[in-house]
Amino acid sequence: MIVAGQVLTRREWLVFLDGYGSGFGHGIDRGRQLADDEAAEIHRRAGVIVDRLARLDTHDVHRLKVRLRAVEAANTELARRVSRSSPGDDEHLEMVVSARRPPTGHELRRVATEFVAGSGERAS
């Protein structure tokens, strides 16, 4: 047999194949170990990401609840101010509404209902 330009005897050839096979087998084992390590690292990172997202979600929910309370307080104040004004005082209503973010449709319906109820008319 000729390997790398050298003529090998049968025994040398078998030793070469044994070494090559061992190296090949070791390479396969090492490749599997690296793949397992990489998969474990990916799994660990995914766990960290999921944990952070869970914490972020809790934080965002808390932040949204705080914002909701602030909006409800602003709505209550708006309704209180509007109920004090006269039914034709659109200028006052516009001033109060423009003092904060634009109201949602739900807020407008609620304020309008309270405004009409406060003026003695039926809400439609």
Image (spheres, helix red, strand yellow):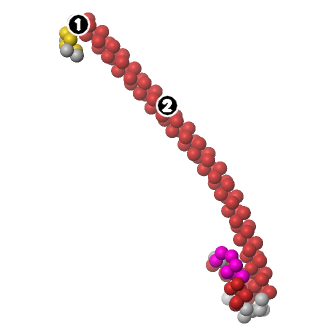
Position of the N terminus, as image quadrant, is: top left
Instruction: Identify the residue position indicated by label 1 in the image.
Output: 10
Residue 50 highlighted magenta (yes or no): no
Q: Residue furthest bottom?
A: 88
Determine whether the residue tagged by mark 2 lies in a helix, strand or loop: helix
The part of the chain drawn in magenta is 96-102
Left or right of residue 39, residue 67 in this image: right
Q: Quadrant of residue 17?
A: top left
Determine whether the residue tagged by mark 1 lies in a helix, strand or loop: helix
- Label 2: few (<14), some (14–19) or many (≥20) C-alpha neighbours in 10 Å: few
**Residue drawn at (52%, 36%) of the image:** 41
Residue 98 highlighted magenta (yes or no): yes
Kindly tell me whether residue 112 is visible in this rendering. Answer: no
Which percent across, then down, holds residue 43?
Answer: 53, 38
Left or right of residue 43, residue 6 in this image: left
Which percent across, then down, holds residue 67?
Answer: 70, 65
**Residue drawn at (41%, 27%) of the image:** 31
Looking at the rendered structure, which numbered label has been put on residue 37? 2
Against 104, residue 42 (above or below) is above
Separation (CA) of disc 2 from disc 1: 40 Å
Looking at the rendered structure, which numbered label has been put on residue 21? none
Amino acid carrying label 2: it is: Asp
